[in-house]
């Protein structure tokens, strides 16, 4: 395991989840499995004092470094790392905001393609995550399961036969598993059918969350769907229920896209081409506005409205690179929000203008 | 869709809440109201915890005074913040927690699924030999944790050696099992799933 002191953005711009590959990647951006684990004999993350946290971090770092996966993994201790590195890791989905904003000994371990990450000393001692491009929940679960097995051989994991994996918050106890998919549902939003997805999801015991950028803009075309319960049902059962429900949302979105193409093609084309025009011309642009237009670009690319050079990979890359920490890394230093808006517009013009 | 709480901002968080009489209710909130209602952030646990006891009768039934012998957390303090202090809290508060879990996990109160011992229905170990090796490792590791905690360093040192040997044996066994499996599958080109 390579211990690093800063997060160097690798030559390849982003993780595997940005490639736009995998099943149904036109609608399912990524699939994620998260497992919560704790060490026996230690207080949970938030309750442990600095000394205990240091011992926990050392024990887990040691377990990770002796695992079969160690050779290819990198490890960054976040206490002592630059704040910008933490923000970069958050934007790349390698760590949570909570871990970034936390205090005291804590760290993160990740694989070269950034599909596996292990957060150390979050609310729970270990938060293991596998993130894959497209609708690949089963594959993500298989990968998470094997990393978890490797860790269980090297760590004294807190487990009871009655409650399963013991966690800090009762909502995570049992399997400790959260399975989620990130969906791009622009046609359902545009046709105002998205509320049906919220209601259907809630009825089936799934949580649906809208995602948005830096500011307070309340809605976007991106939604995360995840399991709400994780005790009393097996991992396979939990993954399976998302596996069953999500295709219905995918079909629903496809149906709306087809309907728009047949009934209101001009409006759809106009939306994509306007987004294309704005992103290639704007001199200053906020995260929210950029995300809105990138969403239209993504849809336009899939419906073959826009030039073939607008690929999923490019749009996904722009989604990542237009966020504050990545812009600042690209610009070589800290930037005020206004300067970031200018840098963001520059980036869009450069990458889309050359097509 | 507007937020059910402030009725002003758009709802972005959607989930189901199981109420006292086990009826489920759809919840649609904006991010602000969601975060406000759950200071802990991730879940609707505080509402559930207070709800779980709103109907409790005699004060004698109240588990608030229960205290975890390991970390000192009282059940009353847990109710306030919705987070447990250590793994042992789960044993200490198991009775009142069970009522809470039933609500949070839609009736689920007992674990079903894998275990760190490789012997769950979906555990990592595939053969009986594998499972007994995993169990041995886990047992040794538990003894080691306890020895370190009790500052019994001599015992800890010998347990550490035993653990290392057990891990090596298990790794060898896994490698052998993989090689066996590969042999029995035969060469890659002759796989049974390949169509002619
Ligand atoms: Zn609200
Ligand atoms: Zn405790």
Image (cartoon, rainbow, N blue to C red):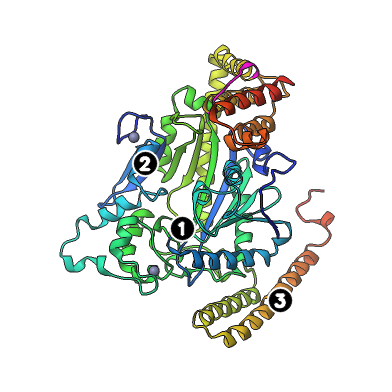
Q: Which residue matches tag 3?
A: B168
The answer for how far apart the CA atoms under marks 1 and 2 are is: 26 Å
Q: Nearer the viewer, residue A118 or A31?
A: A118
Vertical side of B8 occupied by B178: above or below: below
What chain does mark 1 sit on? A
Q: Which residue matches tag 1?
A: A233
Vertical side of B79 occupied by B67: above or below: below
Q: Are marks 2 and 3 on the same chain?
A: yes
Look at the numbered disc 2 and give the secondary structure of its residue.
helix
Question: Is A284 part of what is drawn in magenta?
Answer: yes
Residue located at (52% from left, 44% from top): A244
What chain does mark 3 sit on? B
Residue A51: percent from left, percent from top: 50, 67
Residue located at (39% from left, 73% from top): B70
Q: Nearer the viewer, mark 1 or mark 2?
A: 2
Which numbered dot is residue A33? none
Q: Nearer the viewer, mark 2 or mark 3?
A: 2
Residue B33: percent from left, percent from top: 34, 39
Is residue B59 visible to the viewer in this orientation of the structure? Answer: yes
- B62 sits to left or right of A185: left
Mark 3 nearby-residue class (10 Å; few <14, some 14–19, many ≥20) = few
Residue A347: percent from left, percent from top: 66, 26
The answer for how far apart the CA atoms under marks 1 and 3 are is: 33 Å
Q: Decide if ligand 1 comes within 8 Å of the CB at mark 2.
A: yes
Q: Are marks 1 and 2 on the same chain?
A: no
Question: What is the span of residues highlighted in magenta in the rendered image?
Answer: A280-287
Q: Nearer the viewer, mark 1 or mark 3?
A: 3
Q: Quadrant of ligand 2?
A: bottom left
Residue A137: percent from left, percent from top: 59, 47
Q: Nearer the viewer, residue A207 or A157?
A: A157
Q: Nearer the viewer, residue B88 or B173?
A: B88
Question: Is A209 part of what is drawn in magenta?
Answer: no
């Amino acid at each position: 395991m390579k211990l690093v002191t800063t997060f160097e953005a690798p030559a390849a711009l982003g993780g595997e989840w940005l490639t736009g590959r995998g099943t149904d990647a036109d609608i399912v951006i990524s699939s994620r499995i998260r497992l919560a684990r704790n060490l026996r004999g230690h207080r949970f993350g938030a309750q442990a004092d600095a000394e205990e946290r240091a011992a926990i971090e050392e024990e887990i770092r040691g377990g990770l470094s002796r695992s079969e996966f160690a050779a290819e993994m990198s490890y960054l201790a976040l206490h002592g790392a630059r704040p910008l590195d933490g923000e970069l890791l958050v934007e790349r989905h390698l760590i949570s905001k909570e871990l970034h904003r936390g205090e005291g000994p804590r760290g993160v371990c990740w694989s070269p393609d950034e599909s596996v990450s292990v957060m150390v000393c979050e609310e729970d001692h270990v938060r293991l995550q596998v993130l894959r491009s497209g609708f690949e929940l089963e594959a993500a679960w298989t990968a998470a399961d094997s990393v978890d097995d490797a860790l269980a051989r090297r760590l004294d994991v807190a487990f009871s036969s009655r409650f399963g994996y013991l966690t800090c918050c009762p909502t995570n106890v049992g399997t400790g598993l959260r399975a989620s998919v990130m969906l791009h549902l622009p046609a359902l939003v545009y046709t105002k059918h998205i509320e049906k997805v919220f209601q259907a999801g809630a009825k089936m015991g799934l949580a649906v969350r809208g995602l948005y950028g830096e500011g307070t803009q309340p809605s976007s075309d991106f939604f995360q769907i995840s399991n709400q319960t994780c005790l009393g049902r097996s991992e396979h059962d939990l993954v399976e229920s998302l596996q069953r429900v999500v295709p219905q949302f995918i079909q629903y979105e496809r149906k709306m896209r087809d309907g728009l193409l047949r009934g209101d093609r001009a409006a759809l084309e106009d939306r994509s081409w306007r987004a294309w025009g704005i992103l290639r011309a704007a001199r200053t642009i906020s995260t929210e506005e950029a995300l809105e237009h990138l969403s239209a670009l993504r849809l336009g690319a899939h419906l073959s409205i826009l030039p073939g050079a607008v690929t999923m990979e490019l749009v996904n890359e722009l989604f990542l690179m237009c966020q504050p920490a990545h812009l600042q890394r690209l610009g070589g230093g800290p930037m005020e929000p206004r300067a970031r808006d200018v840098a963001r517009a520059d980036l869009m013009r450069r990458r889309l203008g050359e097509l | 869709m507007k937020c059910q709480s402030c009725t002003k901002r758009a709802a972005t968080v959607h989930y189901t809440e199981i109420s006292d009489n086990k009826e489920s209710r759809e919840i649609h909130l904006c991010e602000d109201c969601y975060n406000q209602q759950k200071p802990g952030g991730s879940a609707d646990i505080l509402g559930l915890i207070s709800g779980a006891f709103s109907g409790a009768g005699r004060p004698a039934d109240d588990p608030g005074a229960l205290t975890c012998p390991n970390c000192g957390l009282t059940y009353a303090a847990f109710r306030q913040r919705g987070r447990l202090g250590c793994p042992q809290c789960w044993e200490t508060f198991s009775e009142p927690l069970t009522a809470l879990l039933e609500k949070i996990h839609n009736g689920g109160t007992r674990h079903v699924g894998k275990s760190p011992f490789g012997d769950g229905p979906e555990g990592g170990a595939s053969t009986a030999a594998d499972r007994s090796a995993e169990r041995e490792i886990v047992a040794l590791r538990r003894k080691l944790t306890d020895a370190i905690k009790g500052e019994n360093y001599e015992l800890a040192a010998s347990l550490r050696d035993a653990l290392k040997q057990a891990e090596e044996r298990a790794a060898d066994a896994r490698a052998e099992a993989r090689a066996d499996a590969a042999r029995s599958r035969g060469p890659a080109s002759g796989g049974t799933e390949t169509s002619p």
